[in-house]
Amino acid sequence: MRTPAENAQLALLLEVTATPKPGNVDRDREYPDLRFEHFMTGAVGASEGLRMAAAGEPIGESFEHAVDGMADQRGGNTQFGALLLLVPLVRASGTGELTPEHAAEVVEETTVADAAGFYRAFEHVDVGIDDPPDEMEALDVRRGADAIPELEARELTLEDVLAASVERDGVAREWVSRFSRSFEIAERITSGEGSVPDRAARAFLEALASEPDTFVVKRHDEATAREVTEAARAALRGDADPDALAEELVDAGVNPGTTADLVAAGLFIALEDGLTV
């Protein structure tokens, strides 16, 4: 029987093998500097931090270790957002029943030290981040450990830090909404048909069609994100070819990374709930 940490690692591997996931690296598509092998290596490297989370170690420290291990490959940031979702979910599963309620409890119990670990994680890998609001400039995550004194002065927990980003970041939104989309995606994968990667690819397209991807908004703009959502809806209706859409988005450099992060979290929840592979 697999442990929660092993299921989290498997979820990362299954997510990247799913195809087509328009705009994302998968087993059929890569970017010149971000390849399938980098995601496989990142999933393996994250294992220590995931084991720490399952054992009940502090969330921030577990996340930093997971990111540090993930970054031990030449592609750079492969699964930062996915790990930010997985670490609290693994902690919830390792310390009790994996439910939205228990996951919310894990979030509510985060500390200022956890926030510090989250900030230190940004020193291990480059992450696409928007400029913060003026009132949060001293807490720009790109400052890494240099921002920790300000965190401590304001007594901000990791939940507090992520709550400040819910309007512009879909991963942060999961943290304060009981991982609602992650659990919804898990249900879609569990009830789907075919291989697990095929179910994950379908769940990705459905999630992409349900609302604009916040990573696309950050890297491009809201209009582009809405266009991608409409294209995903057309593919679900059968009015467009998902494989052709995948090629188009990769060629345009439009990467719905937040949606991929959510699928990884959904896969983990489904695996923990008994999904067989």
Image (cartoon, helix red, strand yellow):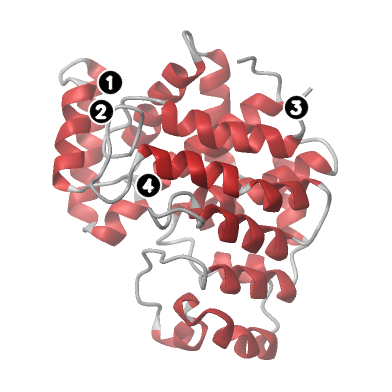
Q: Amino acid at mark 2?
A: Arg
Of callouts 1 and 3, the N-terminal one: 3
Q: Which residue is tagged 1?
A: 236
Secondary element under disc 4, as helix, strand or loop, is helix
Q: Nearer the viewer, mark 3 or mark 2?
A: 3
CB contact under 8 Å: marks 2 and 1: yes
**Which disc, if any, is residue 233?**
2
From this view, report whether residue 115 is shown above or below residue 72: below
Q: Residue at x 75, y 47 (%)?
A: 51
**Which disc, if any, is residue 2?**
3
Of callouts 4 and 1, the N-terminal one: 1
Of callouts 2 and 4, the N-terminal one: 2
Q: Which residue is tagged 4?
A: 257
Q: Amino acid at mark 4?
A: Gly
Secondary element under disc 1, as helix, strand or loop, is helix
Secondary element under disc 3, as helix, strand or loop, is loop
